[in-house]
Amino acid sequence: SVGMRPKVRHFNALLEALAKAPGGSRLEDALRLLEDMKARELPLDEFTYTALVDACRLAADRVHWETALVLREDMIRHGITPNAYVLVALLKTFRSAGLQLSHHTDLYLQLFREASEHPDVPPDAPAYLVLLVLLCKGDTGSAWLEALEVFEEFMQSQNRKRPSLRKMTYILRAILMVCERAYGGSLWKEALSVYRKMQTELRGLPHTRPDVISVNVLLGALSKAKGGSRWKEAWEEFEEAKASGLTPCYSTYTRMVQVCAHAAGGTRWEDVLRLLDEMKAEKETLDRNSRGEDKEGLLVVGFGKAMQTAIYKSRNGPGRQALLQALER
Protein backbone atom coordinates (compact mmCIF):
# COMPACT_ATOMS: atom_id res chain seq x y z
CA SER A 1 0.00 0.00 0.00
CA VAL A 2 1.00 3.64 -0.43
CA GLY A 3 3.26 4.84 2.34
CA MET A 4 4.23 1.38 3.53
CA ARG A 5 7.87 1.33 4.61
CA PRO A 6 9.70 -2.00 4.06
CA LYS A 7 10.97 -3.54 7.30
CA VAL A 8 14.16 -5.47 7.90
CA ARG A 9 12.33 -8.81 7.86
CA HIS A 10 11.17 -8.10 4.30
CA PHE A 11 14.74 -7.47 3.19
CA ASN A 12 15.94 -10.56 5.06
CA ALA A 13 13.40 -12.69 3.22
CA LEU A 14 14.66 -11.28 -0.06
CA LEU A 15 18.27 -12.02 0.95
CA GLU A 16 17.34 -15.62 1.71
CA ALA A 17 15.71 -15.92 -1.71
CA LEU A 18 18.83 -14.53 -3.41
CA ALA A 19 21.00 -16.99 -1.48
CA LYS A 20 18.89 -19.94 -2.63
CA ALA A 21 18.52 -18.88 -6.24
CA PRO A 22 18.53 -21.81 -8.71
CA GLY A 23 21.95 -22.44 -10.23
CA GLY A 24 23.80 -20.62 -7.48
CA SER A 25 23.19 -17.64 -5.24
CA ARG A 26 22.90 -14.09 -6.53
CA LEU A 27 25.74 -12.90 -4.31
CA GLU A 28 26.38 -9.56 -6.02
CA ASP A 29 22.70 -8.68 -5.83
CA ALA A 30 22.65 -9.68 -2.15
CA LEU A 31 25.63 -7.42 -1.38
CA ARG A 32 23.99 -4.51 -3.18
CA LEU A 33 20.83 -5.10 -1.19
CA LEU A 34 22.88 -4.92 2.01
CA GLU A 35 24.12 -1.47 1.01
CA ASP A 36 20.55 -0.42 0.28
CA MET A 37 19.52 -1.58 3.78
CA LYS A 38 22.32 0.48 5.30
CA ALA A 39 21.31 3.52 3.28
CA ARG A 40 17.76 3.16 4.62
CA GLU A 41 19.23 2.89 8.14
CA LEU A 42 17.40 -0.37 8.77
CA PRO A 43 18.35 -2.25 11.98
CA LEU A 44 20.44 -5.10 10.60
CA ASP A 45 20.40 -8.34 12.61
CA GLU A 46 21.81 -11.87 12.78
CA PHE A 47 19.32 -13.10 10.17
CA THR A 48 20.59 -10.48 7.72
CA TYR A 49 24.18 -11.67 7.95
CA THR A 50 23.34 -15.38 8.11
CA ALA A 51 21.55 -15.03 4.77
CA LEU A 52 24.50 -13.10 3.31
CA VAL A 53 27.03 -15.70 4.45
CA ASP A 54 24.80 -18.42 3.00
CA ALA A 55 24.91 -16.52 -0.28
CA CYS A 56 28.72 -16.75 -0.16
CA ARG A 57 28.53 -20.50 0.41
CA LEU A 58 25.92 -21.18 -2.26
CA ALA A 59 27.54 -19.13 -5.03
CA ALA A 60 28.17 -21.22 -8.12
CA ASP A 61 31.98 -21.05 -7.82
CA ARG A 62 32.01 -21.69 -4.00
CA VAL A 63 35.13 -19.55 -3.41
CA HIS A 64 33.78 -16.58 -1.45
CA TRP A 65 34.88 -17.54 2.05
CA GLU A 66 36.94 -14.35 2.39
CA THR A 67 33.83 -12.29 1.58
CA ALA A 68 32.05 -14.20 4.35
CA LEU A 69 34.75 -13.15 6.83
CA VAL A 70 34.45 -9.52 5.69
CA LEU A 71 30.70 -9.71 6.31
CA ARG A 72 31.36 -11.04 9.80
CA GLU A 73 33.62 -8.06 10.54
CA ASP A 74 30.96 -5.73 9.16
CA MET A 75 28.43 -7.38 11.45
CA ILE A 76 30.60 -6.75 14.50
CA ARG A 77 31.12 -3.12 13.49
CA HIS A 78 27.34 -2.72 13.54
CA GLY A 79 27.25 -3.96 17.13
CA ILE A 80 25.90 -7.43 16.37
CA THR A 81 27.55 -10.40 18.09
CA PRO A 82 27.78 -13.47 15.79
CA ASN A 83 25.60 -16.25 17.18
CA ALA A 84 25.44 -19.99 16.50
CA TYR A 85 23.51 -19.53 13.25
CA VAL A 86 26.13 -17.20 11.81
CA LEU A 87 28.88 -19.54 13.01
CA VAL A 88 27.33 -22.55 11.27
CA ALA A 89 26.90 -20.54 8.07
CA LEU A 90 30.58 -19.49 8.20
CA LEU A 91 31.89 -23.00 8.89
CA LYS A 92 29.76 -24.46 6.10
CA THR A 93 31.15 -21.81 3.76
CA PHE A 94 34.71 -22.86 4.64
CA ARG A 95 33.81 -26.51 4.07
CA SER A 96 32.27 -25.75 0.67
CA ALA A 97 35.37 -23.79 -0.33
CA GLY A 98 37.56 -26.80 0.48
CA LEU A 99 39.97 -24.92 2.74
CA GLN A 100 43.00 -26.93 3.84
CA LEU A 101 42.66 -27.82 7.50
CA SER A 102 46.36 -27.38 8.28
CA HIS A 103 46.16 -23.68 7.36
CA HIS A 104 42.91 -22.73 9.06
CA THR A 105 42.45 -24.76 12.24
CA ASP A 106 43.12 -21.71 14.44
CA LEU A 107 40.57 -19.67 12.49
CA TYR A 108 37.84 -22.29 12.96
CA LEU A 109 38.50 -22.49 16.69
CA GLN A 110 38.70 -18.72 17.12
CA LEU A 111 35.32 -18.19 15.46
CA PHE A 112 33.83 -20.97 17.54
CA ARG A 113 35.15 -19.53 20.82
CA GLU A 114 33.89 -16.07 19.98
CA ALA A 115 30.42 -17.41 19.14
CA SER A 116 30.45 -19.25 22.47
CA GLU A 117 30.31 -15.85 24.19
CA HIS A 118 26.90 -15.05 22.69
CA PRO A 119 24.48 -14.48 25.59
CA ASP A 120 21.37 -15.91 23.91
CA VAL A 121 22.33 -18.28 21.09
CA PRO A 122 25.67 -20.00 21.83
CA PRO A 123 26.88 -22.93 19.69
CA ASP A 124 24.48 -25.87 19.71
CA ALA A 125 24.74 -29.44 18.42
CA PRO A 126 24.75 -28.46 14.69
CA ALA A 127 27.58 -25.98 15.32
CA TYR A 128 29.66 -28.60 17.12
CA LEU A 129 28.95 -31.06 14.33
CA VAL A 130 30.10 -28.78 11.51
CA LEU A 131 33.27 -27.89 13.42
CA LEU A 132 34.11 -31.55 14.07
CA VAL A 133 33.54 -32.42 10.40
CA LEU A 134 35.99 -29.67 9.42
CA LEU A 135 38.58 -30.84 11.96
CA CYS A 136 38.48 -34.43 10.70
CA LYS A 137 39.44 -33.48 7.14
CA GLY A 138 43.05 -32.61 6.47
CA ASP A 139 45.74 -33.32 3.91
CA THR A 140 48.02 -34.74 6.63
CA GLY A 141 45.40 -36.21 8.96
CA SER A 142 42.81 -34.81 11.32
CA ALA A 143 43.29 -32.10 13.92
CA TRP A 144 42.56 -34.76 16.50
CA LEU A 145 43.74 -32.97 19.65
CA GLU A 146 41.56 -29.94 19.05
CA ALA A 147 38.64 -32.11 17.98
CA LEU A 148 38.76 -34.22 21.13
CA GLU A 149 38.76 -31.05 23.25
CA VAL A 150 35.73 -29.74 21.36
CA PHE A 151 33.97 -33.08 21.79
CA GLU A 152 34.62 -33.14 25.54
CA GLU A 153 33.33 -29.58 25.81
CA PHE A 154 30.16 -30.62 24.01
CA MET A 155 29.61 -33.62 26.29
CA GLN A 156 30.27 -31.69 29.49
CA SER A 157 28.30 -28.55 28.71
CA GLN A 158 25.50 -28.14 31.23
CA ASN A 159 23.68 -25.44 29.30
CA ARG A 160 23.03 -27.29 26.04
CA LYS A 161 19.65 -28.69 25.19
CA ARG A 162 19.66 -32.46 24.85
CA PRO A 163 20.08 -32.98 21.09
CA SER A 164 18.05 -35.40 19.04
CA LEU A 165 19.17 -38.96 18.39
CA ARG A 166 20.03 -38.00 14.82
CA LYS A 167 22.31 -35.12 15.86
CA MET A 168 24.00 -37.20 18.56
CA THR A 169 24.64 -39.95 16.01
CA TYR A 170 26.18 -37.51 13.53
CA ILE A 171 28.47 -36.08 16.22
CA LEU A 172 29.57 -39.60 17.14
CA ARG A 173 30.42 -40.35 13.50
CA ALA A 174 32.40 -37.12 13.15
CA ILE A 175 34.60 -37.64 16.22
CA LEU A 176 35.19 -41.29 15.31
CA MET A 177 36.36 -40.16 11.86
CA VAL A 178 38.75 -37.73 13.55
CA CYS A 179 40.25 -40.62 15.53
CA GLU A 180 40.42 -42.91 12.49
CA ARG A 181 42.19 -40.32 10.33
CA ALA A 182 44.80 -39.16 12.84
CA TYR A 183 48.23 -38.75 11.30
CA GLY A 184 50.63 -41.64 11.99
CA GLY A 185 47.97 -44.20 12.88
CA SER A 186 44.48 -44.16 14.29
CA LEU A 187 43.71 -43.14 17.85
CA TRP A 188 42.02 -46.45 18.56
CA LYS A 189 41.89 -46.00 22.34
CA GLU A 190 40.23 -42.62 22.02
CA ALA A 191 37.86 -43.95 19.34
CA LEU A 192 36.83 -46.85 21.55
CA SER A 193 36.38 -44.60 24.57
CA VAL A 194 34.26 -42.10 22.61
CA TYR A 195 32.16 -44.87 21.07
CA ARG A 196 31.40 -46.47 24.44
CA LYS A 197 30.68 -43.10 26.04
CA MET A 198 28.25 -42.20 23.30
CA GLN A 199 26.55 -45.59 23.46
CA THR A 200 25.94 -44.95 27.16
CA GLU A 201 24.56 -41.49 26.32
CA LEU A 202 22.31 -42.83 23.55
CA ARG A 203 20.82 -45.55 25.73
CA GLY A 204 18.84 -42.84 27.46
CA LEU A 205 17.04 -42.01 24.20
CA PRO A 206 14.05 -44.05 22.92
CA HIS A 207 14.27 -46.46 19.97
CA THR A 208 18.05 -46.57 19.84
CA ARG A 209 20.33 -49.26 18.52
CA PRO A 210 23.93 -49.20 17.28
CA ASP A 211 24.40 -47.03 14.22
CA VAL A 212 26.00 -49.08 11.44
CA ILE A 213 28.08 -46.19 10.05
CA SER A 214 29.50 -45.39 13.50
CA VAL A 215 30.32 -49.06 14.05
CA ASN A 216 32.03 -49.20 10.66
CA VAL A 217 34.18 -46.15 11.40
CA LEU A 218 35.12 -47.59 14.81
CA LEU A 219 36.16 -50.87 13.18
CA GLY A 220 38.20 -48.87 10.67
CA ALA A 221 40.02 -47.12 13.52
CA LEU A 222 40.70 -50.45 15.25
CA SER A 223 42.06 -51.92 12.01
CA LYS A 224 44.52 -49.01 11.58
CA ALA A 225 46.01 -49.10 15.08
CA LYS A 226 49.74 -48.53 15.12
CA GLY A 227 51.60 -51.83 15.53
CA GLY A 228 48.72 -53.98 14.30
CA SER A 229 44.95 -54.02 14.48
CA ARG A 230 43.11 -54.36 17.77
CA TRP A 231 41.29 -57.48 16.68
CA LYS A 232 40.08 -58.54 20.12
CA GLU A 233 38.38 -55.21 20.73
CA ALA A 234 36.96 -55.21 17.20
CA TRP A 235 35.39 -58.63 17.61
CA GLU A 236 33.98 -57.68 21.00
CA GLU A 237 32.30 -54.53 19.69
CA PHE A 238 31.15 -56.30 16.50
CA GLU A 239 29.42 -59.09 18.43
CA GLU A 240 27.98 -56.73 21.04
CA ALA A 241 26.57 -54.44 18.35
CA LYS A 242 24.87 -57.38 16.61
CA ALA A 243 23.43 -58.56 19.92
CA SER A 244 22.04 -55.05 20.45
CA GLY A 245 20.20 -55.05 17.13
CA LEU A 246 22.81 -53.96 14.58
CA THR A 247 22.28 -55.28 11.07
CA PRO A 248 25.76 -55.42 9.46
CA CYS A 249 26.22 -54.30 5.86
CA TYR A 250 28.92 -55.12 3.32
CA SER A 251 31.05 -52.25 4.63
CA THR A 252 30.94 -53.75 8.12
CA TYR A 253 32.31 -57.07 6.90
CA THR A 254 34.94 -55.32 4.78
CA ARG A 255 36.28 -53.58 7.87
CA MET A 256 36.20 -56.78 9.91
CA VAL A 257 38.30 -58.49 7.23
CA GLN A 258 40.70 -55.54 7.40
CA VAL A 259 40.90 -55.99 11.17
CA CYS A 260 41.81 -59.67 10.71
CA ALA A 261 44.27 -58.95 7.90
CA HIS A 262 46.23 -56.35 9.87
CA ALA A 263 46.44 -58.23 13.16
CA ALA A 264 49.87 -58.18 14.77
CA GLY A 265 51.64 -61.48 14.09
CA GLY A 266 49.87 -62.21 10.82
CA THR A 267 46.42 -62.61 9.33
CA ARG A 268 43.79 -64.24 11.50
CA TRP A 269 42.63 -66.32 8.58
CA GLU A 270 40.35 -68.58 10.60
CA ASP A 271 38.37 -65.50 11.61
CA VAL A 272 38.19 -64.38 7.97
CA LEU A 273 36.71 -67.78 7.05
CA ARG A 274 34.19 -67.33 9.83
CA LEU A 275 33.20 -63.94 8.41
CA LEU A 276 32.84 -65.39 4.91
CA ASP A 277 30.56 -68.15 6.20
CA GLU A 278 28.46 -65.59 8.06
CA MET A 279 28.17 -63.41 4.97
CA LYS A 280 27.11 -66.39 2.87
CA ALA A 281 24.44 -67.37 5.41
CA GLU A 282 23.13 -63.80 5.61
CA LYS A 283 23.41 -62.91 1.92
CA GLU A 284 19.73 -62.12 1.40
CA THR A 285 19.62 -59.94 4.50
CA LEU A 286 22.85 -58.21 3.47
CA ASP A 287 21.50 -57.45 0.02
CA ARG A 288 18.24 -56.13 1.44
CA ASN A 289 19.91 -53.90 4.04
CA SER A 290 22.65 -52.62 1.72
CA ARG A 291 20.44 -51.26 -1.05
CA GLY A 292 21.83 -47.78 -0.50
CA GLU A 293 25.39 -48.97 -1.10
CA ASP A 294 27.15 -49.45 -4.39
CA LYS A 295 27.39 -53.16 -3.67
CA GLU A 296 29.18 -54.13 -6.85
CA GLY A 297 31.82 -51.41 -6.53
CA LEU A 298 32.18 -51.99 -2.82
CA LEU A 299 32.66 -55.73 -3.16
CA VAL A 300 35.12 -55.46 -6.01
CA VAL A 301 37.13 -52.53 -4.70
CA GLY A 302 36.66 -52.54 -0.95
CA PHE A 303 36.02 -56.12 0.08
CA GLY A 304 38.26 -57.44 -2.69
CA LYS A 305 41.20 -55.34 -1.51
CA ALA A 306 40.63 -56.41 2.08
CA MET A 307 40.68 -60.08 1.02
CA GLN A 308 43.81 -59.55 -1.07
CA THR A 309 45.54 -58.07 1.97
CA ALA A 310 44.45 -61.01 4.12
CA ILE A 311 45.74 -63.50 1.56
CA TYR A 312 49.01 -61.64 1.06
CA LYS A 313 49.70 -61.42 4.78
CA SER A 314 49.03 -65.14 5.16
CA ARG A 315 52.24 -65.70 3.16
CA ASN A 316 52.60 -69.35 2.19
CA GLY A 317 51.02 -70.81 5.30
CA PRO A 318 47.84 -72.92 5.47
CA GLY A 319 45.70 -69.79 5.74
CA ARG A 320 46.57 -68.63 2.24
CA GLN A 321 45.27 -71.77 0.57
CA ALA A 322 42.20 -71.86 2.78
CA LEU A 323 41.29 -68.28 1.90
CA LEU A 324 41.82 -68.87 -1.82
CA GLN A 325 39.60 -71.94 -1.74
CA ALA A 326 36.92 -70.06 0.21
CA LEU A 327 36.87 -67.31 -2.38
CA GLU A 328 36.55 -69.84 -5.21
CA ARG A 329 33.51 -71.33 -3.50
Image (cartoon, rainbow, N blue to C red):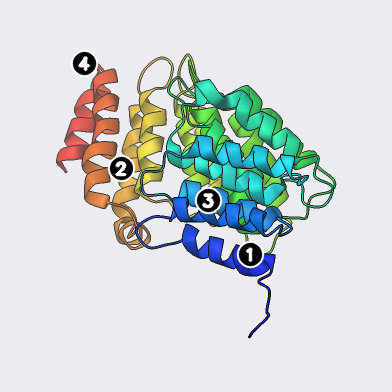
Q: Which of marks 4 and 1 is nearer the N terminus?
A: 1
What secondary structure is marked by label 4?
A: loop
Q: Which residue shows up at 17% across the image and 35% down it?
A: 325
Quadrant location of residue 98? Answer: top left
74 or 307: nearer the viewer: 74
**Pointer 1: what residue?**
207
**Pointer 2: what residue?**
276
Tag 1: residue type? His
Image coordinates of residue 280 in percent, x first then y, are 28, 51
Tag 2: residue type? Leu
Question: How far is disc 2 from disc 4 in space, using C-alphas?
Answer: 20 Å
Image coordinates of residue 149 in percent, x first then y, are 70, 29
What secondary structure is marked by label 3?
A: helix
239 or 127: nearer the viewer: 127
Image coordinates of residue 148 in percent, x first then y, are 66, 29
Tag 4: residue type? Asn
Question: How far is disc 4 from disc 1 in space, using C-alphas?
Answer: 48 Å
Q: Which image quarter holds the N terminus?
A: bottom right
Q: Which of marks 3 and 2 is nearer the N terminus?
A: 3
Residue closest to the far left:
328
Question: How far is disc 3 from disc 4 in space, using C-alphas?
Answer: 68 Å
**Pointer 3: what residue?**
31
**Pointer 4: what residue?**
316
Quadrant location of residue 130? Answer: top right
Is 259 located above or below residue 78 in the figure?
A: above
